Image (spheres, rainbow, N blue to C red):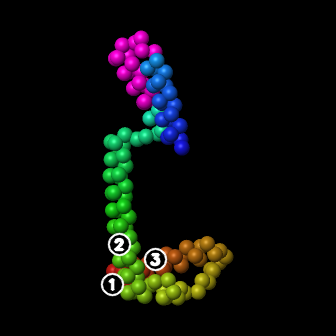
Amino acid sequence: MFKNDVIGRMAQQIGERLQDASHGPEELQKSVQGVMRGAFDRMELVSREDFDIMMDVLTRTRSRVESLEKQVIALEALLEKQGLVAGNAPAAEPATPVDDEGEAAVAKREAASHAAEIERQRDA
């Protein structure tokens, strides 16, 4: 609907320019080109070059996403093989706060311990 409105306005403006035919053909051509440029700008069209650039970016992004998906699948398979998939993960040692450390310090220590265990299993 919007594009039809823009085209209608463009046709009207060109018609007005044609009625004022006292100008030479070059002046008329410049005037019509100005009307068309304004109409195309309002339609928010992109140049072919910009479109091609964005298609290239999209293609590379899609390729990268597919590559990352394959890596995730491989890592999930590795974790499953090692028995570390959610639900199969070895139980963590119970947290026992020492000297009023607080839950945050205990959680941080447990996370570091768990990360070290995963690293040892990966290196084995």
Q: Is residue 2 left or right of residue 100?
A: left
Q: How many marks?
A: 3
Position of residue 19 measured from the top left corner of the image (x, y, whole percent): 46, 18
Q: Is residue 38 above or below residue 101?
A: above
Residue labelled with disc 1: 124
Label 2 CA crowd tier, 10 Å (few <14, some 14–19, many 20+): few
Position of residue 33 measured from the top left corner of the image (x, y, whole percent): 39, 26
Q: Is residue 33 above or below residue 77?
A: above
Q: Which mark is residue 51?
A: none
| Dominant secondary-structure state across the stretch colored magenta | helix
Q: Residue 84's image quarter?
A: bottom left
Position of residue 61 measured from the top left corner of the image (x, y, whole percent): 37, 58
Q: Label 1, secondary structure: give it.
A: loop
Identity of the amino acid at label 1? Ala
Q: Residue 22's image quarter?
A: top left
Magenta region: 20-38
Label 3 CA crowd tier, 10 Å (few <14, some 14–19, many 20+): few
- Tell which circle, 1 or 2, labels the residue nearer the N-terminal end: 2
Position of residue 71 measured from the top left corner of the image (x, y, whole percent): 35, 72
Q: Which mark is residue 115?
A: 3
Separation (CA) of disc 1 from disc 2: 23 Å
For the residues bearing labels 1 and 3, Cβ distance under 8 angstroms:
no
Identity of the amino acid at label 3? Ala
Residue plotted at (38% across, 21% down): 30
Q: Label 2, secondary structure: give it.
A: helix
Separation (CA) of disc 3 from disc 2: 23 Å
- Seen from the viewer's position, the closer of residues 15 and 89 is 15
Identity of the amino acid at label 2? Lys
- Seen from the viewer's position, the closer of residues 106 and 92 is 92
Q: Residue 78's image quarter?
A: bottom left
- Tell which circle, 1 or 3, labels the residue nearer the N-terminal end: 3
Badge nearest the viewer, 3 or 2: 2
